[in-house]
């Protein structure tokens, strides 16, 4: 019977926490329930990746079925959120696309039954060990057999996360629309923002889905577009609507459901009468091409929640991905504002908040940036990284441009300084004549040295960076603040060098001389002396010293 089928629009399945601390499950339209009395503050999954995936899912629903026509309508709904009934009215027409099970089209699953071996359900989780890892007994940090069965709510979120962020998955198994493991950036508009405020702050204006274009928005409503040499790629405006950027389906998957009298989800520990115990997959799903950087709506490009970059002017736009070392203030340029050359762009929704929405909401100094995603090594997830940082801005456009320009100068400078510091440490620790620093066979090079150094460097400079951003505008000229930033960098660099490159009784004279030489070179660089030092001064837009004339 249809009543027993699981519909992600009509049934309560999203775990949430209200302001009072009460935990409950809701339908998507109920994100605004009891908004004045006890608003919903956040989703409450036991996994960080499910939290971020839930934001994307709910923002995607709003963008697809309830997007505002323009900024004025967006602002009206920011000030007075819609009712549950109004969201229900918007979501009801698309509910047929959100059955997770049943005889018809299934949410984010292949249009047809698949003949393939049944895979354990835990492999639906991006960070689960793969088949080859298990065969080679290498699942040391992410152990096998942790998840044997999922309830339908957790299975739906795992499926959405995999289809949205799909890494490379072996021969013929395609990556997500944004490539494997994209970086997701979201605006947190203010401290203690409600879930509605977080979702609406990141929802773009634009068109809504119609009955006519339903199949090009939700690809599982029609026969799957197979990839291969003779098959077409999935391109926006050709065989897919741009709204499909929220609902990409690169993998051909069918979930396996089992009815039980009494069972429990291994992730949520909730009681369930239907469990998902496995899934089947076939290769050659839709091959997404040409999406990144395509216009979504005026002022917004695909993907609205992911920063983009290109290697050079005129090159193809690509999605930004998390890298080893995490996300921190050194990435602020490119995540919040564009780089000087325009080849790194923040996600459209972050850019719109920074330039327009925060101003009209009176929250230019209140917002924070949430950046998260899987750091992938091809098919293997190294880690799920998540970071928050301030989003300082200004209501005055001229002041905001000054802040952004100051940030670019600071980040250009810190990137030069970090490269110089790591080079100095390498040269001080290792003799180039006797050992190759990058010889993988040589175990002298310890990566933890630079991991610890980076942690020290970031923790000793990040606070000052944001403090100075908030001070821009207090003086007519920002040179004083740039000098203060250079002083901060100098202190962190020298302290970091000294605590990493240690002199001891066992240090040879030759090694000690090499350490001293590297330290002197660092000091000269930080004094903006020499070719590299002058480049640092130019990056920070500091006055260059007069070169002394040789006699």
Image: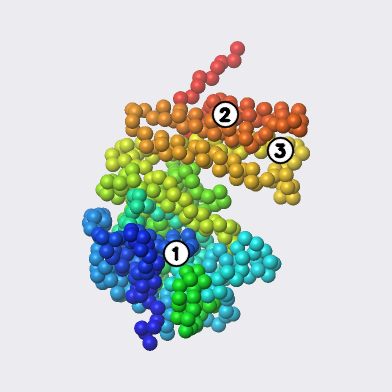
Q: What residue is at 48 percent from the left and 53 percent from the top?
A: 386
Depth check, front residue: 32 or 264: 264
> Nearer the N terminus, badge 1 or badge 2?
1
Q: What residue is at 41 percent from the left and 27 percent from the top?
A: 480
Q: What residue is at 45 percent from the left and 80 percent from the top?
A: 273
Q: Is residue 468 visible?
A: yes
Quickly name the residue at label 2: 525
**Which picture quadrant has residue 525?**
top right
Give me the C-alpha separation between circle 1 and circle 3.
Answer: 46 Å
Where in the figure is residue 31, as x and y percent of width and height?
32, 64
Crowdedness of circle 2 by 10 Å Cα count: few (<14), some, many (20+)? Answer: many
Q: Is residue 97 visible?
A: no
Where in the figure is residue 14, as x and y percent of width and height?
39, 68
The quadrant of the image that shows the C terminus is top right
Element on which disc 3 rests: loop
Give me the C-alpha separation between circle 3 and circle 2.
Answer: 20 Å
Quickly name the residue at label 3: 430
- Determine whether label 3 and label 2 are within 8 Å by CB: no
Lateral position of residue 373 relative to residue 99, left or right = right
Where in the figure is residue 395, as x and y percent of width and height?
28, 41
Q: Is residue 327 above or below residue 22?
A: above
Q: Which mark is residue 45?
A: 1
Question: Which is in the foreground here, disc 1 or disc 2?
Answer: 1
Depth check, front residue: 141 or 98: 141
Element on which disc 2 rests: helix
């Amino acid at each position: 019977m249809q009543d027993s089928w699981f519909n992600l629009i009509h049934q309560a399945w999203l775990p949430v926490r209200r302001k009072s601390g009460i935990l409950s499950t809701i339908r998507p339209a109920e994100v605004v329930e009891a908004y004045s009395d006890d608003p919903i503050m956040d989703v409450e999954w036991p996994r960080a990746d499910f939290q971020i995936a839930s934001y994307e899912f709910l923002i995607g629903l709003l963008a697809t079925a309830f997007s505002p026509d323009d900024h004025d309508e967006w602002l009206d709904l920011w000030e007075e959120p819609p009712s549950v009934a109004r969201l229900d009215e918007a979501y009801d027409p698309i509910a047929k696309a959100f059955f997770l099970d049943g005889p018809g089209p299934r949410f984010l699953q292949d249009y047809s039954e698949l003949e393939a071996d049944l895979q354990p359900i835990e492999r639906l989780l991006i960070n689960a060990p793969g088949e080859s890892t298990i065969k080679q007994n290498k699942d040391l940090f992410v152990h096998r057999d942790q998840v044997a069965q999922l309830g339908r709510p957790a299975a739906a979120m795992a499926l959405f996360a995999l289809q949205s962020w799909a890494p490379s998955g072996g021969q013929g198994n395609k990556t997500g629309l944004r490539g494997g493991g994209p970086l997701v950036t979201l605006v947190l508009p203010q401290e203690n923002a409600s879930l509605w405020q977080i979702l609406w702050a990141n929802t773009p204006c634009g068109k809504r889905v119609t009955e006519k274009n339903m199949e090009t928005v939700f690809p599982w409503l029609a026969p799957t577009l197979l990839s291969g040499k003779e098959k077409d790629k999935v391109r926006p405006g050709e065989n897919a609507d741009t709204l499909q950027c929220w609902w990409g389906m690169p993998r051909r998957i069918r979930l396996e459901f089992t009815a039980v009298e009494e069972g429990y989800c291994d992730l949520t520990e909730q009681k369930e009468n239907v469990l998902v115990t496995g899934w089947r997959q076939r290769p050659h799903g839709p091959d997404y091409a040409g999406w990144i950087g395509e216009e979504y709506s005026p002022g917004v490009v695909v993907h609205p929640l992911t920063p983009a970059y290109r290697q050079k002017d005129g090159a193809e736009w690509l999605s930004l991905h998390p890298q080893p070392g995490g996300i921190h203030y050194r990435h602020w340029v490119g995540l919040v504002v564009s780089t000087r050359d325009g080849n790194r762009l923040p996600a459209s929704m972050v850019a719109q908040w920074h330039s327009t929405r925060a101003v009209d909401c009176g929250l230019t100094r209140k917002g924070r940036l949430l950046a998260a995603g899987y750091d992938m090594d091809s098919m293997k997830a190294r880690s799920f990284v998540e970071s928050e940082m301030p989003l300082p801005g200004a209501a005055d456009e001229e002041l905001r441009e000054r802040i952004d320009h100051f940030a670019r100068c600071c980040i250009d400078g810190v990137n030069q300084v970090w490269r110089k510091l790591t080079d100095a440490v390498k040269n001080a620790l290792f003799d180039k004549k006797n050992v190759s620093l990058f010889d993988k066979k040589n175990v002298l090079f310890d990566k933890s040295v630079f991991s610890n150094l980076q942690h020290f460097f970031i923790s000793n400079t990040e606070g000052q960076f944001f403090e100075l951003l908030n001070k821009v505008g207090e003086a007519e000229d920002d040179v004083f603040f740039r000098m203060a930033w250079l002083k901060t960098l100098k202190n962190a660099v020298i302290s970091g060098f000294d605590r990493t490159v240690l002199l001891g009784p066992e240090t040879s004279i030759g090694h000690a001389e090499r350490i001293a030489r590297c330290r002197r070179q660092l000091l000269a660089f930080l004094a903006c002396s020499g070719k590299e030092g002058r480049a640092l001064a130019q990056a920070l837009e500091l006055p260059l010293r007069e070169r002394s004339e040789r006699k």
